[in-house]
């Protein structure tokens, strides 16, 4: 119930840039540690208009899952390019067979995720 987050404070330096219709949703996601924002210089920003990377999407989706999921090391041809903060998310979704990578064995973690890719991940989780 997003109404229960109305009195919570957004802890990002760009809170004023979040559209009014989304503020309580963002408050809920940040309070539940599903989304946290990112560093932008010396600031922490939510950056509501930014494109979502595959690493960000995998991290967010992995945080909504049961925390007792056994993980296995995700092995992809570009595993070295997975940011440290996203590694656990890739390991969790890999263990659940939600992600398997592209035909060339890569996951392109820093590339923008497409709507189709995001829908596939959500569908595989549920």
Image: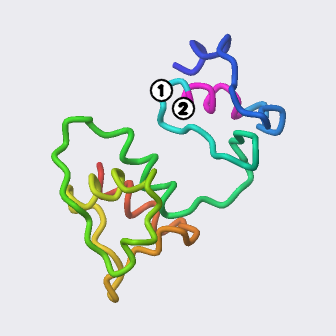
Instruction: Look at 38% across and 40% down and name the residue there.
Output: 63
Q: Residue furthest toward the bottom?
A: 104
Q: Which residue is drawn at 53% across and 39% down?
A: 35
Q: Where is residue 121 in the image (x, y as percent from the top left)?
A: 37, 59
Mainly helix, strand or loop, the magenta region?
helix
Q: Can you identify the residue that label 1 sits on?
A: 32
**Do the residues under discs 2 and 1 have CB atoms within 8 angstroms?**
yes
Q: In this view, does 95 lie to the left or right of 13?
A: left
How many marks are shown on the rendered structure?
Answer: 2
Q: Which residue is drawn at 46% across and 75% down?
A: 108
To which quarter of the image does residue 104 belong? bottom left
Q: Give the range drawn in magenta.
A: 22-30
Q: Name the residue under label 2.
A: 29
- View extreme (right): residue: 16
For residue 62, above or below residue 29: below
Label disc, if present, on residue 13 of the rendered structure: none
Q: What SS does tag 2 mark? A: helix
Q: Where is residue 27 in the image (x, y as percent from the top left)?
A: 62, 26
Residue 70 shown left or right of residue 39 in the figure? left
């Amino acid at each position: 119930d997003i109404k229960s987050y109305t009195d919570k404070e957004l802890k990002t330096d760009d809170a004023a840039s979040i559209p009014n219709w989304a503020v309580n949703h963002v408050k809920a996601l940040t309070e539940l540690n599903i989304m946290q924002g990112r560093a932008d210089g010396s600031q922490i920003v939510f950056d509501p208009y930014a494109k979502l990377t595959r690493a960000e999407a995998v991290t967010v989706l992995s945080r909504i899952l049961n925390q007792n999921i056994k993980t296995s090391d995700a092995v992809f041809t570009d595993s070295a390019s997975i940011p440290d903060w996203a590694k656990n998310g890739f390991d969790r979704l890999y263990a659940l067979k939600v992600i398997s990578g592209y035909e060339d064995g890569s996951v392109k973690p820093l590339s923008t995720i497409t709507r189709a890719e995001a829908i596939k991940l959500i569908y595989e989780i549920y």
